[in-house]
Image: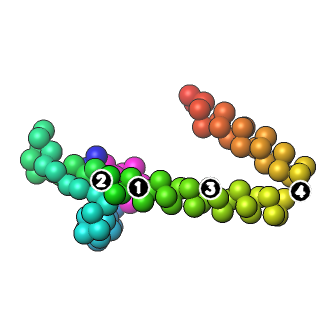
Amino acid sequence: MSAGQLATHERLQPQSLTRILAALEDQKLIARAADQADLRRSIITVTRLGSEVLRRNARLQDAWLAKAIAQTLTPTEQEFLKIAAQLLDRISAAQV
């Protein structure tokens, strides 16, 4: 997607992303290519390294959350949380 589309999706001003995108590109986490439909724009894609970083970060977050749930919540609270998550899944899938 373009920087403008990303800004809209994230509810940010495009100018707010300039430094962030430059840093991600410097770290080889994203790549930019000319938009063939509009050569004034660039299309941003996540690189293989960027995808690996995202996956690793997601695994670390999942592990932290699982440990926090196991150590903090009672079995009954864990069951309530499971039900709440299922309800949120249904709500997010709703075509309202």
Q: CA distance from mark 2 to mark 3?
A: 22 Å
Q: Which mark, by number, is residue 74?
A: 4
Q: Which badge, 3 or 4, is on the more N-terminal residue?
A: 3
* Gap between marks 3 and 4 measured at Cα: 19 Å
x and y percentages locating residue 4 in the rendered image: 28, 53
Q: Quadrant of residue 16?
A: bottom left
Q: Give the residues in magenta.
A: 5-12
Measure how far apart labels 2 and 1 are at the Cα level: 9 Å
Residue depth check, mark 3 versus mark 1: number of the one nearer the observer: 1
Q: CA distance from mark 4 to mark 2?
A: 41 Å
User: Which element carries disc 2, helix, strand or loop?
Assistant: loop
Point out which mark residue 62 bears.
3
Closer to the chain start, of discs 3 and 1, is: 1
**Magenta-drawn stretch, dominant element (helix, strand or loop):** helix
The secondary element bearing badge 4 is classed as loop
Q: Amino acid at mark 4?
A: Thr
Q: Earlier in the sequence, mark 4 or mark 2?
A: 2
Amino acid residing under circle 3: Asp
Tell me, yes or no, if residue 13 can be seen here. Answer: yes
Q: Earlier in the sequence, mark 2 or mark 3?
A: 2
> Type of residue at label 2?
Thr
Q: At 25% from the left edge and 52% from the top edge, which residue is drawn?
A: 44
Q: Which residue is mark 1?
A: 52
Q: Which residue is mark 2?
A: 47
Count residues near mark 4 (Cα–Cα under 10 Å), then give few for <14, some for 14-19, many for 20+. few
Count neighbours of disc 3 (C-alpha within 10 A) and say few if under 14, some if 14 to 19, many if 20 or more.
few
